[in-house]
Image (tube, rainbow, N blue to C red):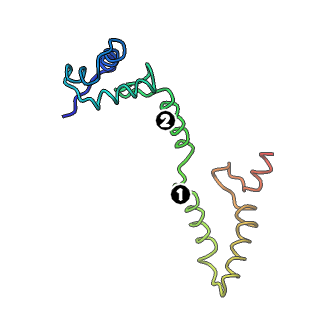
Amino acid sequence: MKKKYDKEFKIQTIRLIQEQGKTVAQVARDLGLSENTLYRWIAEFKQDGNSAFVGSGQLKSEDKAMRELQKMIQDLGNCYDNACIESFHSVLKKELVYLEKYKTREQAKKSIFEYITCFYNGKRIHSSIGYLSPNNANVCAV
């Protein structure tokens, strides 16, 4: 089982080595620790100073800032959440594709393009934008 040491213990141990001139091997032997553990603590302390050894769910200031930034990005939306486009495809199929028989791919492309530009954006109202068509919503926004 891995032992856990608090921040104060780690700092006092490092001070024994740095300020009192004891060797890492001697301190490790006296405290029953591995020399590698002490070398790791020393390296972390040299790198982060008094903000080293945060532990217990605490984060370093730069790590905390990064975590907050990641959370903000996640709140913006999930790029894999395609419910909106799936809803659009459902409407497109019900209102156009299933009602037509296309002889060629070009005929289907032209029909879908006309549906989107003329009807879907031009005349069809959408509840998410106050029961306006997208074209009217854009005019009102300007």
Q: Amino acid at mark 2?
A: Arg
The one of 50 and 65 positioned closer to us in this rendering: 50
Residue 56: image quadrant is top left
Q: Dot 1 lies on which element?
A: helix
The residue where tag 2 is placed is 67
In which quadrant will I find the N terminus?
Answer: top left
Relative to 96, does residue 1 appear above or below in the rendering?
above
60 to 129, vertically: above or below: above
Extreme-bottom residue of the structure: 103
Left or right, 35 with respect to 117, comes to left
According to the image, label 1 marks what residue?
83
Measured as percent of width and height from the top left, residue 40 is found at: 34, 30
Task: Please tell me how crowded label 2 is: few (under 14), some (14-19), or many (20+) other residues with Cα within 10 Å.
Answer: few
Residue 62, horizontal then vertical, whole percent: 51, 30
In the rendered structure, the answer to whether residue 12 lies left or right of residue 70 reads: left
Query: Which mark identifies residue 61?
Result: none
- The front one of 85 and 43 is 43
Give the residue displayed 62% in from the left and 78% down from the top: 99
Looking at the picture, tell me which residue is in the foreground, 42 or 78.
Answer: 42
